Image: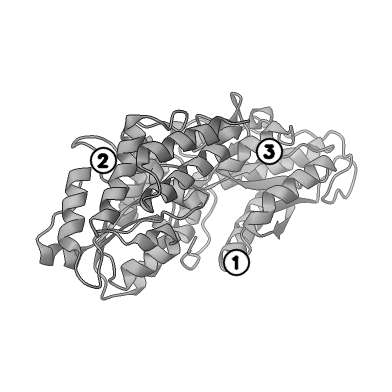
Amino acid sequence: MISPARPPARRIAALLTGTIALIVAATGCGGGTGAESAPGKVASITALDYYTDEPEHSQWGEILTSCGKRAGVMVEQTSVPGASLVPKVLQRASSRTLPDLLMLDNPDLQQIAQTGALTPLGRYGIDSGGYAKGILSAGTYKGKVYGLAPYVSTIALFYNKDMLAKAGVAVPRTWDELKAAAARLTRPGRYGMAVDANATFEGTWQFLPFLWSNGGDEKHLDTPQAAQALQLWVDLVKSGSMSKSVLNWTQADVHDQFVAGRTAMMINGPWRIPALDKDKNLHWGVAPIPVPRAGQTPVTPLGGEVWTIPQSASKARQQKAAQVLACLNSSSTMLTLAEQHFTVPSRPAVAAQYAEQVPSIAAFAKNVEAARARTGELGVRWPKAATGIYTAIQSALTGEQTPEEALRHAQRTATSN
């Protein structure tokens, strides 16, 4: 994600919702990583994340250091590239050398929790109340909460105010309005609409609001509701309102097209806001993703990372890690992180406060209330369904298969052993 410069550090305050009670036990020291200066006394703990780029790496380092000080420990931060995090975690889990505190992309939690490498947060007395249902689901495995997210993200519709005003087009709220608006906004050198439809989980992520809002389900991809959602994208490409290049674009590419004036509308996330704000000549707005019928609420996917506490031979270090994790999920830390990363605080009360401060976040905060965890229905089987979905998108948008044919194949992929 693109993050703005870090604001001044804030004092860590109590959570707005619920009280965090931590069971601080000075029992056992055992093996693992991190220093223990005396039996039962923990001097430092380790934390692993995938924020290798600046300023995110340093921002997380400062937050971890601050929360560590409040817990009375030094937090030793290590960051690895995102693609290598899960393989490294699985390798270290087998050798029992996991860090004391572990960040995971929320769809990966199911896979890691399934191995037995993580501990339920209820063990430490951490209150998981006050979170939106979808957010809590993202950190839950088999009914137990294993991870909590200080913030989350989702996607919405960005639009160029000047282009819409000049074309006399209102911000589209429904699929029919979206197709009509995209057609009127399209002209030589400019498309009306842009999405990321590439052959990765990112392409699936962008399609989910259209699938879910139409009543489609990743458990049953071969349904009329799913086909109708994919047909909408096919229609946009066939009509010339959306470039065929969306098959290869990333979310960053979509952003670049929007900034360059080569598309009037796009689907993207709040982490793009800092870059958009830098262009003073670009007048943009953000609205909920259009829905099939007027009056519906869009159902969007949840992005963001959860913090977890791996299994360890040292109960004392686990308790310290729990104190740091609780601090990361405190209201003031949520606000600081949201300001840094332009994301949505995970507790609705804090998100509402932030949306008042930053109006451009309001649409995302609203979407988060009804957002879903990608693993909420399928758990560890989600990656197979996600692969089937983006493969179907590619087949349908290239004309290789009809949406119905492509999604029937996707369903077979998702249910195969």
Identify the residue shown where x is 49% and y is 55%: 336
* Comparing labels 3 and 2, the label whose residue is closer to the camera: 2
Q: Residue at x 56, y 42 (%)?
A: 106
**Mark in front: 3 vs 1:** 3
x, y (%) of residue 304?
A: 51, 48
For this rendering, which residue is in front, 416 or 99?
A: 416
Q: Is residue 95 visible?
A: yes
Q: Position of residue 365 (x, y in %)?
A: 36, 45
Q: Which mark is residue 291?
A: 2
Q: Is residue 20 visible?
A: no
Label 3 crowding class (10 Å Cα cut-off): few <14, some 14-19, many 20+? Answer: many
Residue at 61% x, 34% y: name it: 380
Q: Is residue 190 left or right of residue 276?
A: left
Percent across and percent down for residue 289 are 29, 47
Q: Amino acid at mark 2?
A: Val
| Residue under numbered circle 1 | 53
Q: Is residue 12 left or right of residue 269?
A: right
